[in-house]
Amino acid sequence: MSFTPDIRLFSCHYTSQQSCADEGKELSELGFPANIKMTRVVCTGKLEEVTLLKAFEDGADAVYVVGCPGDGCHNVKGSLRAAKRVQAGREALAELDVEPERAKMYHLPRGLHPEFVDAGREMNERIIKMGPSPF
Amino acid sequence: MIIAERKPLAEIIEMVQDCKKILVLACRGCVTVCSAGGEREAEILASLIRLGLKKAGKKAEVFDTSLVRQCDREYIDAIDQFKGKYDAIVSTACGVGVNFIANLRPDDNVFPALNTTFFGGSAEQGVWSEQCAGCGDCVLHLTGGLCPVARCAKSLMNGPCGGSVDGRCEIHPDVDCVWQMIYDRMGRLDRQQEMAQSAPIRDWSTAGHGGPRKQVREDLTV
């Protein structure tokens, strides 16, 4: 059964700033899935594990975070901290007998690169295959 | 401080599966410092309980709040502001906090969210190790400040067991042999000769082997 997943993206301000140019028009033209709701954060290191969990409570089928490369974070260790929190979220999902792959961390370079769009497509395709959230 | 860690989620969710209103109660004492049961962890746990119960098809309201400490009557009294809003408390305090709520609120259901593990310290971020066993008869003045009761796998009182290799414990090879550490440290302090004296047979009644311990300070009671 095909469905349109509700996917929440929390993205680093720097990683996504060019992706948001012209109100995301370019991003849309490049094929970024329209069902992904992006929230830009000053630094992914600012994200708390509970923010990811509350997205699931709010009806998300999947949550992912895009932050700077591990060795090139604008705030030194922000994206590494984010990756730890995403991992904690994945482990909590596993404890609840839910696929951990519904939460994922990506480390991508700044600016509008094909990888940013690819990550969105990858998440979208994975969750379509997986089906709706069991919550 | 007291070190603790969250119980497996399945265990916690089973405890509250029939509850309709759940209060996840954080403690701002030791368990906040060791990131096991402070406000942040209680907020996460409340969210996970909501998700877990929802997945199981159960409806429940789960909210979270915190007390300064859960090991003092004056702070436990603050729970009363939530009276009627919950039918179970999930405490993210150590076992002392859970016991205190059970002692002082005889009609409230209280469940432990944590396993209380040991008295320890954190020499580096995210890592805690046991340093004290709370045995009630401290010998640190004889051992250069390093505790053989808590830090020797066999709690030996008169030197190493003979099984340590290259200064590492034979039970836990990633742990330094505390008797090796004591010997080296006493040498640096020019006190190694003190180690030739045998420690007397120990009375373990102070370590809880004689039942629950209690301390009364007449100068503080009113």
Image (cartoon, coloured by chain):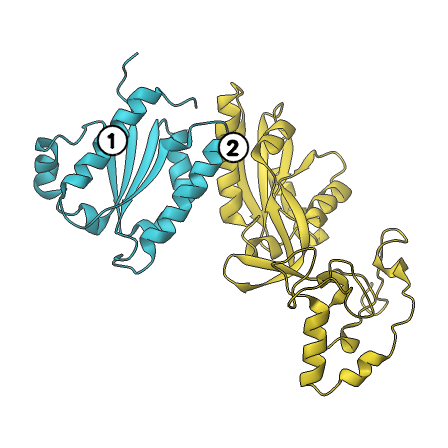
Name, please, the residue furthest toward the bottom: B190
Residue A38 place in picture, x, y as percent: 24, 37
On the question of residue B83 being in view, the answer is no
Q: What numbered label is drawn on residue A122?
A: 1
Chain letter of the residue beneath label 2 in the structure image: A
| Image point (85%, 62%), residue name | B216
Q: Quadrant of residue A39?
A: top left
Chain letter of the residue beneath label 1 in the structure image: A
Answer left or right for B127 relative to B162: left
As drawn, the chain in cyan is A
Q: Secondary structure at mark 1?
A: helix
Residue A121 place in picture, x, y as percent: 21, 30
Nearest to N terminus: mark 1 or mark 2: 2
User: Residue B167, relative to residue B53: is it above or below?
Assistant: below
Q: Quadrant of residue B25?
A: top right
- Amino acid carrying label 2: it is Glu
| Image point (22%, 33%), residue name | A120
- Dot 2 corresponds to which residue? A95
Q: Colour of chain B?
A: yellow
Q: Secondary structure at mark 2?
A: helix
Q: What numbered label is drawn on residue A94?
A: none
